Amino acid sequence: MAGRTFNTEKEQQFIGMLMKMPMADRQKELLKCDLNSLAKAMKDYSNPQIEAFALALPRHLRAEFAKTVKMHKGEIPFPKKKVVRRTIQKHHYAQAVVAVAVIIILIFYLDWFMP
């Protein structure tokens, strides 16, 4: 979600205005906001205030938004990236090459000594 970011002091004062807005107006304004930037800016608010604020968000974003704010507060750790291990497939051509060479040598040997 791109849109309004909350980096400056003036934009952080806008959060206070959002808190006082009616629910319908708050929903319209939140559609224009970058929620990650908003979560980072709301780290100074208490958890009940955050949950009350998140009621204006769609249902599937409420818990995620509250969790993101708690991460920025330091209450819960950020998820760590998992190391993806990729298995390298080694092709075992050596045995096949040796087998073909032995068969070719055997054919020439049998053809030469046993006509």
Image (spheres, grey):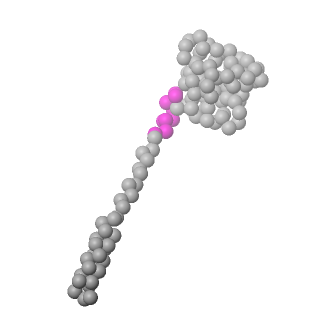
Quadrant of the image occupied by residue 63:
top right
Image quadrant in which the C terminus is located:
bottom left
Quadrant of the image occupied by residue 89:
bottom left
Report the magenta residues as a range: 72-80
Does residue 95 sit above or below 113 in this rendering?
above
- x and y percent of residue 44 in the render? 55, 21
Residue, x 33% and y 70% (percent of image)?
96
Residue, x 73% and y 18% (percent of image)?
21
- x and y percent of residue 20 in the render? 71, 17
Quadrant of the image occupied by residue 24:
top right
Magenta portion: prevailing SS class = loop
Between 98 and 115, the one nearer to me in the picture? 115
Across the whole image, how many numbered discs are drawn on residues?
0
- x and y percent of residue 94 in the render? 30, 66
In the displayed orientation, state which residue is furthest to the bottom.
114
In the image: residue 47, left or right of residue 112:
right
Does residue 9 sit above or below 73 in this rendering?
above
Q: Is residue 47 visible?
A: yes
Q: Is residue 88 magenta?
A: no
Q: Is residue 46 visible?
A: no
Residue, x 75% and y 24% (percent of image)?
23
In the displayed orientation, state which residue is furthest to the top.
10
Between 2 and 63, the one nearer to me in the picture? 2
